[in-house]
Image (cartoon, rainbow, N blue to C red):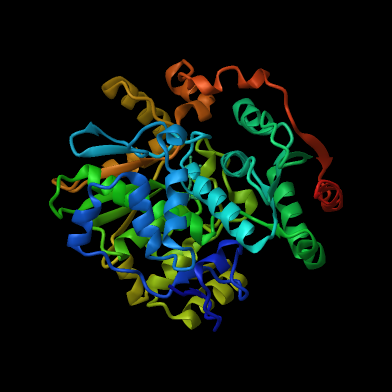
Amino acid sequence: MNYLSTRGHPDRKRFCEILLEGLAPDGGLYLPETYPQVDTATLAKWRALPYAELAFEILSLYIDDIPPADLKAICAKTYTAEVFGTDEIVPLRELEDGVYLEALSNGPTLAFKDMAMQLLGNLFEYELARRGSELNILGATSGDTGSAAEYAMRGKKGVRVFMTSPDGRMSPFQQAQMFSLQDANIHNIAITGVFDDCQDIVKAVSNDLGFKRKYRIGTVNSINWARLLAQVVYYFAGYFQATAGNDKPVSFTVPSGNFGNVCAGHVARMMGLPIQTLVVATNENDVLDEFFRTGVYRVRAAVDTHETSSPSMDISKASNFERFVFDLVGRDPARLRQLFVDDLGLQGSFDLSADPAFKQAAGRFGFRSGRSTHADRLATIRDTEKRFATLIDPHTADGLKAAREQITPGVPMVVLETALPIKFAATLVEALGEEPARPKKFEGIEALPKRVVKLPADAEAVKAYIAENCD
Ligand SMILES: *Cc1c(COP(=O)(O)O)cnc(C)c1O
């Protein structure tokens, strides 16, 4: 399998080459040259597989530069009941007639990002050992991504994590999750500033090419193809659990921010998984909902990005969206560049409303969308607790609300549960008047010793810290 750049760079790469890379050299995103096709006989065969073996089968279609026995061992080591809480790994439960919740949040940090990040940690360790090389991951987090990365990379050989976060701005639970890690290869850096300062520091360090090369700086952001690929697996697993052996279609609703999760659903659908509809659920930051309603993609300025009670969906532009639009415009890199480089670069938006391709978003590609507000989230959390005695987190609530607006009778609707409610306790208290129960392993973590350094919002200070801690 070869990978290309959405922006038309002539090079073709194999999986392990792009594993440790971010963007393609021309600024595009990597995609496979073709989507492998899965027929009904294969689906029938895969239906009975345990999650780790299903992951191996799907990954094998995209990875041909890791020996199968090694890849199989990596999958087996990643997707265990010990790490994800159940044998099913992503158990499905019916909430109401035809509406299901697929649990993706029972990994180490209680958000769906563990599903991909845990695999990435093991792939990184494997590939770095094979090359005799090292990687220093530099990141910025306001919560979920940083903790998922740290729990995935802790104790891994050849990998260090330097994670910046805005000092004092994460929830006490999120801080405790990250700062209580005592592993020598995990470095928490609290920046006196806001999240944007952290992101600016990461950009400044990455733009210093000499430093980047000398200290082998890498990232684990959501545009990484391996992360997206890992997420394709749970669409298959959800499909199998929602159907009973026929080839009937299923729909999925996905609480969305950077469009990584739902893009994995798009890939599963392109492979031939019978998905009828993919519902993109957004909060007040509705860049994506606006596109699927109108054909206009209008990125927001930082000041127009709302701070909401589903904070992991607070984005002003969706970094994986380019992958879908590439397919939407018939994989034409010149057209893609016109939209993402010329139009977005010049005017901060592009308009496909009059382009015949736009009709295909809902038609051939099956996309719908929905939007929620803070009041909707509270109402959905309350209603779900009252009628089904089930607690859901604010992001999942955004999903459930959008899902109910797009139901087709007879087609199961699977809502992806992207976090556990305990991660967003303040909103649960606002909705229900009480704190959700906390999993045992997290009891009392706020009282554990913390491992964190405080640095000013200054890229030079962060560079000096990395240099000091790199041997
Ligand atoms: C990251 C995240 C999302 C958004 O996922 P994308 O892949 O960026 O669309 C939604 N919910 C939660 C809880 C998250 O952590």
Residue placed at 47% from the left, 56% from the top?
Answer: 70
Q: Is residue 10 above or below residue 139?
A: below
Q: Is residue 129 above or below residue 143?
A: below
How many discs mark residues in the rendered view? 0
Q: Is residue 436 left or right of residue 122?
A: left
Instruction: Give residue 93's position: percent from left, percent from top.
Output: 27, 33
Instruction: Give residue 180's position: percent from left, percent from top.
Output: 67, 28
Residue placed at 38% from the left, 70% from the top?
Answer: 353
Look at the image and tell me whether residue 370 can be seen.
Answer: no
From the viewer's side, name the closer residue of 97 and 298.
Answer: 97
Look at the image and tell me whether residue 360 can be seen.
Answer: yes
Tell me the quarter of the picture where residue 306 sits: top right
Residue placed at 36% from the left, 31% from the top?
Answer: 380
Tell me the quarter of the picture where residue 34 sits: bottom left
From the viewer's side, name the closer residue of 385 and 301.
Answer: 385
Q: Quadrant of the N terminus?
A: bottom left
